[in-house]
Image (tube, helix red, strand yellow):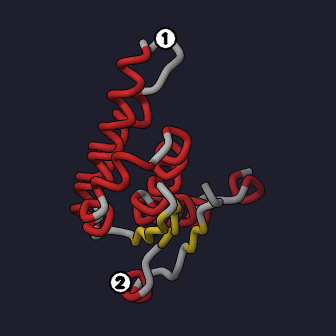
Amino acid sequence: MKAAKMENMGSSDQEVLARAKCTIEIGGRTYEWTEMGRRQGREALAEMLPLLQGYNPSLSAPEVLTLFNRILDFFYKYHARMNADRKHLDNAATNDEIGAALLAIRAVIDAPFRRDAQKVQEEKEIHMPSPESSS
């Protein structure tokens, strides 16, 4: 799989017009994922987190294979073109490609929530009194 390209664009008004994006290559085809709206993003993250946490070395071979199929189903649910290419991807996508794609896509899906956390952190730093002023 080629390295995913991530673009984290804008803030405030620009967020609506230019959302985070990544391009993945899986099964010999290229797909662009764009940051979702917040509600759909929360739903997607809720489904994605168990998939990310699901892999561990103690899984049996059938459990690992089932996990990769569940990840593909996640892609199909949230990306119309991947869903249209379902038959091809079911036959061509490798486990390595599926796993790498999931990690790249996570960065796009959780982009608005990372920006929120960053804003909160920046606001805390702005409003925190300096150590000199408290003595």
The answer to whether one can see residue 120 in this image is no
Residue in the image at 41% along x and 24% along y? 64
Task: Please determine whether, in this image, residue 74 is positioned above or below residue 39.
Answer: above
Query: How far across and down, in percent of the image, does residue 135 sit?
Result: 74, 50
Q: Is residue 98 left or right of residue 89?
A: right
Residue 34's disc number? none
Q: In front: 14, or 44? A: 44
Q: Earlier in the sequence, mark 2 or mark 1?
A: 2
> If the image is split into quadrants, where does the N terminus sit?
bottom right
Query: How far across and down, in percent of the image, does residue 48 sit?
Result: 34, 43
Q: State the CA–CA distance, disc 2 to disc 1.
A: 42 Å
Query: How far across and down, in percent of the image, does residue 76 sit?
Result: 27, 55
Residue 58's disc number? 1
Task: Please determine whether, in this image, residue 110 is positioned above or below residue 70.
Answer: below
Amino acid found under the numbered disc labelled 2: Val
Q: Is residue 107 left or right of residue 72?
A: right
Quadrant in the picture for residue 51 = top left
Q: Is residue 12 left or right of residue 123?
A: left
Q: Is residue 6 left or right of residue 65?
A: right
Mark 2 highlights which residue?
A: 16
